[in-house]
Image (cartoon, rainbow, N blue to C red):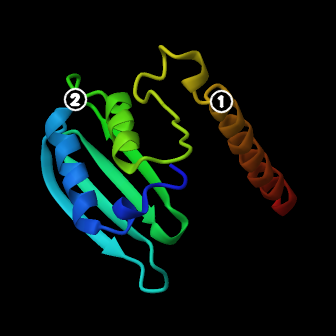
Amino acid sequence: MYRCAEEVVFDKEKIRDILETAADRFCLKELSLYSTENEEGDDFCFVMLCTNGHMFLHVFPTYGYVEADIFTLESAANPEQVAVFLRQEFAPDQAKVTTLKRGDYGSIKDMKPRRQKLVKPMRRAKNAGAKLKKFMQWKKEE
């Protein structure tokens, strides 16, 4: 989220309240909430651990920039709705949302690992090459 409301990004208690409200409203079941600070800059992070997921915010107040990561396995929770809620609360001029479905690699074509079929043949070729080297060295010694 770009160019967020200054009265929000500079207020850590307000951000803490936003995260707790989001967890309650969207079935994320908060376990704990931590905040960290960067000693070299003015940015800070909030990490909320939830049952079967997390919410992570990285806030750069001087730039008005907030980055969020929302992950959940809870079927009742909806990360897209959490993102909409966060956009409403931070009031950015511009926002970008990227959604990634994680989990079953077999059901979504573009989620399959690209090298899945190349790993075994490449490993076999490497092992065969090593065996051939050992064999050739053994032949030289005889």
Q: Nearer the viewer, residue 110 or 100?
A: 100
User: At which x and y percent is residue 7?
Assistant: 36, 63
Q: Position of residue 84 (x, y in %)?
A: 38, 34
Q: Amino acid at mark 1?
A: Arg
Amino acid, disc 2: Glu
Determine which of the numbered discs, if any, sits on residue 114 in the image.
1
Q: Nearer the viewer, residue 106 or 82?
A: 82
Across and down, in percent, residue 32 comes to: 15, 57
130 horizontally vs 46: left or right: right
Mark 1 nearby-residue class (10 Å; few <14, some 14–19, many ≥20)? few
| Residue in view at x 47 percent, y 13 percent | 107
Residue at (48% x, 48% y) in the render: 92
Residue depicted at x 36% and y 65%:
45
- Mark 2 falls on what kind of element? loop
Image side of residue 122 versus residue 30, left or right? right
Q: Are marks 1 and 2 in contact (CB under 8 Å)?
A: no
User: Residue 97's mark?
Assistant: none
Q: Above or below — where is 65 with respect to 92?
A: below
Q: Which mark is residue 74?
A: 2
